Amino acid sequence: MNEIATDGYRGILEGLSKECRLRSIPLAGTDADQEKGRSRLVDLCSNDYLGLAARESEFREAFMHSCPDAAFTSSASRLLSSAQRYHLMLEKALEHLYGKRALLFNSGYHANTGCISALAIPSTLFICDKLVHASIIDGLRIGNADFLRFPHNDLGKLRIMLEKNAGKYARIVVVTESIFSMDGDLAPLRGLTMLKEEFPNMILYVDEAHAFGVRGERGMGMAEELGLTDKIDIIIGTFGKAAASSGAFVATTELLADYFINTSRSFIFSTALPPVCCAWTLFMLQNILLMQPERERLLDTSRRLREALGLPCGEEVESQIIPYVTGDAERAVALAARLREEGYLVLPIRRPTVPPGGERLRISLNAGVDYNSLTRLIEIIGNEK
Ligand SMILES: Cc1ncc(COP(=O)(O)O)c(C=O)c1O
């Protein structure tokens, strides 16, 4: 390729490198780690919160026997494919669990970009928590939506914004995550559902990507744990994290599900998930329903680690995601490297994933982690302070 055409891109990479923000694909478990005897790293960076992905070989045979006919491709989008059996079975199972219509998407990214952009018709205002995921922001951009952002978890400020705008728009969509992906704290879901009673044209949209499988008696997220499923209008769940699979779903009303089928571009214009993937998700879902002991253990390990690291504790912050903010990228990268030498795989999180000054290690626990295996990590981070 002509260099003159690509100079601008090289410049951007060089700039990222100077700021210690150049990303690369991590090589955990590859030859480099094995050479250094680091083949048994404690994995604190994946979203395999229930440890199901790590146990895949246990399930493989039973799974293959249970659905030998599941195809490896759909060969078309949902609106065209003839291979829908497992998609429909998975949707039915979710509908039964949520008491809402369920619609599958190819990923959480597709679900958020597709649903948010479709909701953005004239006279719609979105008010989003300041820290919502990039896929939600991208949905707003694709839909050319009118939107405002409220300070993180600040119900008071949100109410003021609603008071100012409720009369000016036909509908206001309030968007949040139930467990925030980078901070691991929890949205005030009860308060948000109460605001709906004050503002009848408010629609509540909650992304449960990090709570699906992990919270609630059957793993159906914070909505289930707090008994709020019927008060939340649109729930997004993803299968690439605790469910050890791939894909996502929206659980919502009959009307909105039909509306998304007809208007959500990421649903309409993308090849559907492979049937084998839906069959696997369904198989994992059956396990998830029974994993309450693992959910309790995970939360207990999270609480103990937070306490040991001297981080704030309490219901509103306790989840399996534990941020250790270093405040600059260099420190985050150095600390992650130090931990890796000691056998812990923790990744540094930098801009633009977090705002400047919010650079951190994101410790992501899973049910397979024994608290006693974290002793050295607690010491190393303790010495860093
Ligand atoms: C809150 C949130 N929503 C959506 C997504 C996207 O989900 P997926 O990985 O299935 O595309 C993520 C993924 O990191 C996320 O953290």
Image (spheres, grey):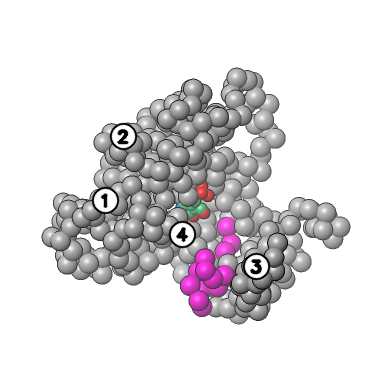
Marker disc for residue 258:
2
Residue 345 location (% of width, % of height): 68, 60
Q: Earlier in the sequence, mark 2 or mark 1?
A: 1
Residue on which the image places disc 4: 134
Marks 4/3: CA distance? 26 Å
Above or below for 155 versus 213: below
Crowdedness near tag 4: few (<14), some (14–19) or many (≥20) residues, C-alpha within 10 Å: some
Query: In this view of the protein, can residue 303 be seen by the observer?
Result: no
Above or below for 123 versus 150: above
Q: Earlier in the sequence, mark 2 or mark 3?
A: 3
Q: Dots 4 and 3: beta carbons under 8 Å?
A: no
Residue on which the image places disc 1: 121
Judged left or right of residue 100, residue 352 is: right
Inspect the image, locate mark 3, and give the three-letter code of the amino acid beneath it: Thr
Outermost residue toward the right? 35
- Asked if residue 127 is among those painted magenta in the image, a careful observer would answer no
In the rendered structure, which segment of residues is drawn in magenta? 350-364
